[in-house]
Image: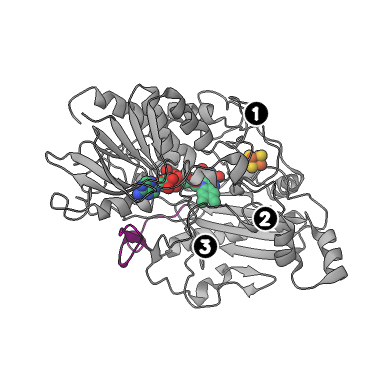
């Protein structure tokens, strides 16, 4: 008999949450994580002089983790969507899109170690894109099915949010009061008012009060560099700390799962992982949860092909890796005539949801949201100001300009729906492998005209808000037309009711392999209208882990 009831692979928003829920329900869990554990007090660099030099201090060796298929040709009719800075001019010089960085984190807690703490519920209508507009796929569950689990997630990580939540109805208020708007965000709020738009405090997994033995935020604004106070609700300091405390969750870091084995009777029979010392181990359990993220989950499943699963594990529909949805984003940044102190606060403290419903942007299906984007552009410290705001120059003149401009940069960002298309997907690269011999995932990316029209709307509206806020000098316009971005990625193991058109069902269970589950961002059938995803990933994991607990007491697994 195995020592574990369930093995969970990957400890990010999906896997870490699932591991806690199962362990809290009395299930014996093994959590395998490819990356290392981070110590918030030691590993993050905000106490060091060179804090700004690195975005997130990765502890993993800098090896190649993915490849890109040839990128999309850029067209002159969309040239107004090309990224531009006042220092470099057009940023991408060539004629094709530039592959960006896949900056998801390998570590205990996954990409939430690096995230900005936004904690959003999906717009209920964003889960019905196929039946309403004939695009993407419908979710096999409704907002009301997820609502109790949203609330549970918010109460566990400590979300601070406003009273007015519009279409995203709530059965109880947020556990914590919202953070106030910073001075720069106030300027944007005033600008929105003159344009007839709304602007409100964002809902954030960042503590506005002491909560659950964690201190409140100190408004250093650098969540993406790793929070050294533990007040940002990353998965390591919330679910994983609680999972450990149950005494029923064994956590092994530095352990990469190499293959999941397809057994007899449509059941997975075990998996093999390589530990940090390079030794391979086989583990057996009653059920297996894959939660490696949108790029690594299809990679692992496709690499697990064998006689019982000739096209890759769980790939009977041929859809593992398909329907990848990448980030559609834009930021317009300018210099305000007044000192704003825009380097302090919490990231994206203010947000506009006016165009978030899937029919809110005229002429294209799929919504967007707009937010205070100074942090997203990482214009926070003297290095960024010196290079990107002041630009060339030395000595006293440079110093005076720095003194004059520091804290005056302000950005408005936007994120929008990305509709799945046949040219955007992940497969295995036949030519490149990592040091374990596992083929690298290869990303194929294409942004269709419908998405570019939505991006155009974001670009135009962010610019209007900046102008209305009194910004008289544009510094940067950065978008994903010419630069691939993976901050929010979804969809490579779509959930749905029909085994022909989806990989897992509405509980994360594969349609064929009875004891195989996927619980991460890869199951999203549509991306939502720019909402940040990790709260939805957590809510899905809580719901699915509850169901898996029940299944473990029956014979069906
Ligand atoms: C810079 C940045 C800012 C962001 N800001 C926000 C935000 O403010 N709000 C928000 O909601 N979302 C945000 N996101 C997105 C959010 O972090 C992700 O959507 C979310 O973490 C995805 O969860 P996941 O479980 O799918 O994958 P991840 O959290 O990436 O977790 C996957 C885990 O699996 C592990 N793994 C992979 N392969 C293997 C293997 N073979 N064996 C063992 N382990 C493996 C990885 O090491 C990783 O720990 C941000 C992302 C980035 C990069
Ligand atoms: S702004 Fe708050 S949550 Fe973010 S890193 Fe600083 S202290 Fe942590």
Task: Where is residue 303? Give x, y as percent.
Answer: 26, 55
Which comes sooner in the sequence, label 1 or label 3? 1
Q: Is residue 138 left or right of residue 72?
A: left
Q: Nearer the viewer, residue 190 or 386?
A: 386
Q: Quadrant of residue 479?
A: bottom right
- Say above or below: 306 vs 540: below
Q: What SS does tag 3 mark?
A: loop
How packed is label 2: few (under 14 Cα within 10 Å), some, or many (20 or more)? some
Q: Which residue is mark 2?
A: 52
Q: Are marks 1 and 3 in contact (CB under 8 Å)?
A: no
Q: Which residue is mark 1?
A: 177
Task: Where is residue 416? Give x, y as percent.
Answer: 51, 52
Disc 1 within 8 angstroms of ligand 2 (CB)? no
Q: Quadrant of residue 418?
A: bottom left
Q: What SS does tag 1 mark?
A: loop
Q: Which residues are magenta?
A: 417-443
Q: Depth-wise, is mark 1 or mark 2 nearer the camera?
A: 2
Which circle marks residue 480 in the picture?
Answer: 3
* Quadrant (top left, top right, bottom left, bottom right) of the C terminus: top left
Q: What SS does tag 2 mark?
A: helix
How packed is label 3: few (under 14 Cα within 10 Å), some, or many (20 or more)? many
């Amino acid at each position: 008999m195995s020592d574990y009831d369930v093995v969970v692979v990957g400890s990010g928003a999906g896997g870490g949450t699932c591991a806690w829920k199962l362990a809290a329900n009395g299930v014996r869990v093994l959590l395998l994580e490819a990356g290392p554990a981070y110590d918030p007090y030691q590993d993050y660099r905000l106490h060091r002089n060179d804090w700004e030099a690195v975005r997130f201090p990765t502890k993993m060796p800098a090896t190649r983790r993915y490849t890109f298929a040839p990128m999309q040709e850029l067209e002159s009719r969309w040239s107004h969507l090309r990224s531009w800075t006042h220092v470099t001019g057009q940023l991408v010089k060539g004629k094709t899109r530039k592959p960006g960085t896949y900056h998801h984190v390998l570590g205990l807690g996954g990409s939430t170690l690096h995230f900005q703490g936004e904690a959003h519920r999906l717009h209920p209508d964003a889960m019905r894109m196929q039946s309403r507009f004939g695009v993407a796929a419908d979710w096999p569950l409704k907002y009301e099915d997820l609502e109790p689990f949203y609330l549970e997630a918010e109460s566990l990580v400590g979300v601070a949010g406003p009273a007015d939540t519009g279409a995203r109805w709530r059965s109880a208020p947020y556990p914590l009061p919202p953070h106030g708007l910073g001075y720069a965000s106030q300027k944007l709020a005033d600008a929105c008012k003159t344009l007839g738009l709304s602007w409100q405090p964002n809902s954030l997994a960042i503590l506005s009060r002491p909560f659950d033995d964690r201190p409140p935020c100190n408004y250093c604004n650098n969540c993406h560099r790793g929070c050294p106070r533990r007040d940002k609700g990353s998965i390591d300091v919330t679910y994983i700390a609680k999972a450990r405390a149950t005494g029923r969750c064994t956590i092994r870091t530095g352990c990469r799962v190499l293959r999941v084995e397809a057994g007899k009777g449509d059941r997975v029979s075990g998996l093999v992982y390589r530990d940090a010392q390079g030794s391979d181990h086989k583990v057996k359990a009653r059920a297996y949860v894959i939660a490696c993220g949108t790029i690594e989950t299809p990679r692992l499943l496709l690499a697990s092909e064998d006689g019982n699963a000739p096209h890759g594990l769980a790939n009977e529909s041929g859809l593992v890796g398909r329907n990848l949805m990448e980030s559609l984003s834009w930021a317009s940044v300018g210099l305000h005539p007044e000192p704003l102190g825009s380097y302090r606060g919490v990231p994206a403290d203010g947000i506009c949801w006016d165009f978030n419903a899937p029919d809110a942007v005229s002429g294209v299906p799929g919504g967007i949201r707009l937010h205070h984007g100074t942090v997203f552009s990482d214009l926070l410290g003297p290095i960024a100001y010196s290079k990107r705001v002041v630009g060339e120059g030395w000595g006293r003149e440079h110093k005076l300009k720095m003194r004059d401009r520091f804290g005056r940069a302000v950005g408005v960002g936007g994120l929008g729906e990305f509709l799945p298309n046949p040219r955007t997907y992940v497969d295995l690269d036949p030519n490149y492998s990592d040091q374990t011999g596992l083929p690298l995932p290869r990303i194929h990316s294409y942004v269709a005209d419908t998405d570019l029209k939505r991006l155009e709307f974001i670009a135009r509206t962010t610019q209007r808000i900046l102008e209305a806020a009194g910004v008289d000098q544009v510094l940067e316009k950065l978008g994903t037309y010419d630069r691939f971005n993976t901050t929010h990625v979804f969809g490579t193991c779509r959930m749905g009711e029909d085994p022909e058109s989806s990989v897992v069902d509405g509980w994360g269970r594969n349609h064929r392999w009875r004891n195989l589950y996927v619980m991460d961002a890869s199951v999203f059938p549509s991306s939502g209208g720019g909402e940040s995803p990790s709260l939805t990933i957590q809510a899905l994991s809580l719901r699915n882990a509850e169901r898996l607990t029940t299944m473990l007491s029956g014979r069906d697994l």
